[in-house]
Structures are given as structure tokens and as C-alpha cells.
Amino acid sequence: MTNFELGPIRPPDEADSLLIRTTRGCPWNRCAFCTLYKGQKFSIRSVEDIKKDILAAQKYYGGRPVEKCFLQDGDSFSMKTADLVEVLHALKEAFPSLKQISSYGRGQTMNKKSAAEIQEIADAGLNMLYCGMESGSDEVLKKMRKGTTAESILNSTRNAQDAGMKTLLFTILGLGGKELTAEHAKGTVDLINGINPGGVRVLTLAVKPGTHLDSMEQAGEFTLLSEAEMIEEQQRILERINGIQSRYGNYHAVNLMPELQGELPRDKGKMLSVINRFLALNKEDQLNFIFGRRQRYYGCLDDLDNADRYRTVQKAMNDFDHGQLEKMFHDQRRNWI
């Protein structure tokens, strides 16, 4: 058990990283789909307390080399530049083996800092930016109460890249609902192409109870995409990603097809062939695969070729009302987020 403070979240890529909490909560905390920091007031921890945690972490690791560190929670760039730089220097002094220090960063926060400040932060050691862009459509961003625009996201990530930081973007399939799926796909791919990030991470939407998005759905203002429709949306995005070199991945368990990962542009054709294979299935086979994945009979689309497993899934699926399956799939996604 650690004796330094930890926040509730870190990116999947930071599973083995040292976690140091610089802020508590999120400075925005109004996104329509998010419950992570609800009821928690945002605060910036003092440099003194953070440095105490760094020393406690140094003792905890006992001299073992640490190569990666992630700064929690939602936006370390909300700290004063001089304070963040002091923390970064303390980290590098305590853990000289560090090769990567990363943080989430909101576009609106980062754009308040000058290019010189971003460069100073990068020079002090913060060399990886995670950006929860979610969508590249201003219409979707507004509807989801993201408090930012595609232009703001583009400017902040480019400033980070100009300073030498690597960038990784998160996007959420289905975030526009049926009403804005075309706008969501187009805006997202345009923003990805414009940024040329080092990585793109895909998540699949799950509407959490008690969120504003949940209220919108109940009021008929937002219509969920089906599982197959979200794969179609991903197809539209992936088809139009061009001119970038990024690691693309569906790494989270909430995603229907985790095999959709690879290097762009090299593996784009291979990933699209998997999507096209799924979309070419008849509706019964699509449903069998979706049910099998959500019930954890299948790990990937190739498992559908196992005749014994297919029959097992079909038998299990027959115990359910097929008209209620999409709701069940959504409930299962919700439990994974």
C-alpha cells in the first residue's frame, strides 16, 4: 500500500507508471457524459505536498528504476507554470531514470499559457500530453458540454507538439448519437488528421445513470447507436484517416473489437478488413458475435469461426428476448466504464 496520495484514474497506457497527484478532480467537470469527479470540488495541491509525495514514492519504490510517471488528476496544466516546473524538477531529481512524464491537458486551460510557458514545461520534463478530445465536431462538443472547441483542441495540441511533447487523443464512438453521427465522424477524423498525434485511443459510449446525457436520452434528445452502428461509425472514421503516423487502438474492454489496433498508415487496411468482415455478416451472425463478446465467450472476431463456441453462444442467446439485447449490451458496456 502506498503512503502517497493517488487519484481515481489514469490512462490505460500508464498501467505500470508512477502516479503523482498534482490536482484533485477536473477544473471543468461539466461534461454531459462524465461522472468521474461529480461532487468533487477541483483543487490544486500545494507544491510542498506534492514534493512530499514524490519523496514518499521514492521511498516506496526503493531505488527501483522508474521510467514513466503520470500526473493526476484531470489537468496538471491548471497549475501555475512555475509550480508545475518545480514539481517536474523534483520528480527528475528523485527518479533520474524517468524517460516520460505525462498528464491530461484541457485545450481551454493550455491555451491560456504562452508558447514560452508550454516550452518551459516541456523542457522541465513533461513530454507526453493526453487529450480527451472525445469529438472533433463543434456541434457534438457543445451538445456534450465539453466547454471547448475543435479549434481550441487543435491549437493546444499543436503548441504541445511544437514544444516537443508527444500527443495522444481519446475519442468516443457514438458520442453524437444517431442525430449527429455523421458530424461526429467527420469532425473527429478532420481533427485527428489536423493534429497528427502519436496515438489515437478509441472508446465506446456508455451512458451513465445520473448524467446530463442520461437525462437527454430519457427526454428523447439523444438516441444511442446500436453496437453495429458504432462499428460503422468507426469504419467511416478509419477510412478517412490519412497522412498521419499514429498508434491506433481499441484497447479498453468496453470496445467490441479489441483487435482493431495497429500502426497507421501501415495497418489501416488490415483493420478495415476486420470491420468489413463484421459488417458483411448477416444480422444473426452479427448478433451472435456481439452477444458472445459482451458475455465474454469471444475475444475477437476470429472466434466466431469456432463452430462449438458459436453454438454455445447461440444457445445462451436464445434465453434472452432479442428485442432487449441492445439494452443489455449497453448495460454491460456501462459496467465496464
Image (spheres, grey):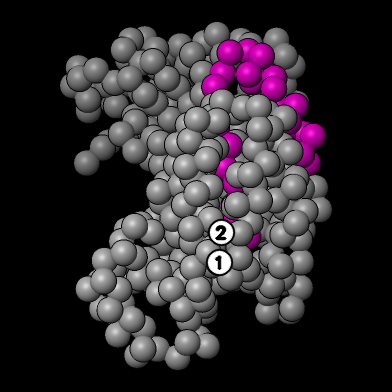
- Residue 130 visible? The answer is no
Residue at 65% x, 37% y is 241
Q: In this view, does 167 lie to the left or right of 271?
A: right
Instruction: Identify residue for label 2.
Output: 231
Relative height, residue 291 to residue 95 (above, below): below
Residue at 25% x, 78% y is 312
Q: Is residue 225 left or right of residue 201?
A: right
Relative height, residue 95 to residue 107 (above, below): above
Pointer 1: residues within 10 angstroms few (<14), some, or many (20+)?
some
Pointer 2: residues within 10 angstroms few (<14), some, or many (20+)?
many
Query: Which segment did they paint magenta?
Result: 149-174
Locate residue 214: give its quadrant: bottom right
Give the camera-side residue of 186 and 9. Answer: 186
Look at the image and say whether residue 175 sits in the magenta stretch. Answer: no
Question: Do the residues bearing badges 1 and 2 touch, measured as CB atoms within 8 Å?
Answer: yes
Look at the image and say whether residue 163 sits in the magenta stretch. Answer: yes
The percent coordinates of residue 14 (x first, y second) are: 39, 35
Count all numbered tags in the image, as a single digit: 2
Quadrant of image for the N terminus:
top left
Q: Specify the amino acid type for callout 2.
A: Ile
The percent coordinates of residue 257 (x first, y second) are: 44, 55
Disc 1 from disc 2: Cα separation: 5 Å
The kind of secondary structure element at disc 2 is helix
Point out which mark residue 228 bears.
1
Relative height, residue 91 to residue 70 (above, below): above
Residue at 76% x, 66% y is 179
Give the camera-side residue of 110 and 154. Answer: 154
Q: Specify the amino acid type for callout 1.
A: Ala
